[in-house]
Amino acid sequence: MISISNLTKIYRKSLRIGKSKHYSETVALDNINIKIDKGEIFGLIGPNGAGKTTLLKILSTLIIPDSGTVTIDGYDILKDEKVVKTKVGLLSGEFTRSLYWRLTGRENLSFFAKLKGMWDVDDRIDYLIDIFGLAGYENEMVMKYSTGMKHKLALAVALVNDPPVILLDEPLTGIDPMTSFEIKKIVKEELRGKTIIWTSHNLFEIEEMCDRIALINNGKIIMVGSPHELMKNH
């Protein structure tokens, strides 16, 4: 479902020191190669700054890579950008910035659905409100939501067009244990059959949720395998 070949991303920044201009480079992704099967929950674990978020932003067409190729369901992320956007849902690590706080929960879902070209979405929105436990709060402005409710709404927005590929950037960070439990249950039960990339720096979380794991550090894939294989061999 997802094929990543020789993927490299370098961030460049200019610095002025006195009268001289200098340039610095940070290699965020260094020749990444990964293949992820349809229906697989693939974990990406590594410290902050390892390249996890950059990889997800490239897969969701938000960032253009410097080199390499990526295909999702056979479509190239650069050549077939419009098609890829319909196939990918992204839960950003900065999830609260992806919501409009002066709109209600339902209005947020409706707005983002229309951005994706969806108009007759009442049934889909009702379904998402129900599975995320937001019934009774859907007509309140998001600014009144708890952090956990905002987190669940942001994930619902990512799922509004029912995409086959879901990118979850540290989906359990900063939320309470009950909301974490609810999100894990939704992923296991409601998203069964979806292809999911789940990033985290929490090994226990990745081990519980993922079929395979890649360890990434300094933009490089260090090792890939099942949780059992990695624990046995390393």
Image (cartoon, rainbow, N blue to C red):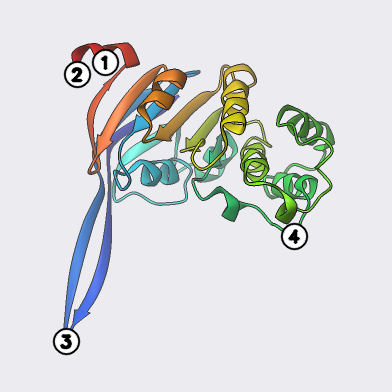
Q: Amino acid at mark 4?
A: Arg
Residue 73 in sight: no
- According to the picture, the residue beneath numbered tag 1 turns out to be 231
- According to the picture, the residue beneath numbered tag 2 turns out to be 234
Marks 2 and 1 close (CB-CB < 8 Å): yes
How far from the left and from the top, in percent, is residue 19? 16, 88
- Of marks 4 and 3, which one's residue comes earlier in the chain? 3
Quadrant showing the C terminus: top left
The circle on residue 18 is: 3
Where on the picture, by quarter, is residue 186?
A: top right
Residue in the foreground of this view, choosing between 77 and 103: 103
**How dense is the environment of label 3, judged by Cα within 10 Å: few (below 14), some, or many (20 and up)?**
few
Marks 1 and 4 close (CB-CB < 8 Å): no
Instruction: Tell me: residue 154, above or below residue 100.
Output: above
Q: Nearer the viewer, mark 3 or mark 1?
A: 1
What element does badge 4 sit on? Answer: loop
Q: Amino acid at mark 1?
A: Met
Residue in the foreground of this view, choosing between 68 and 233: 233
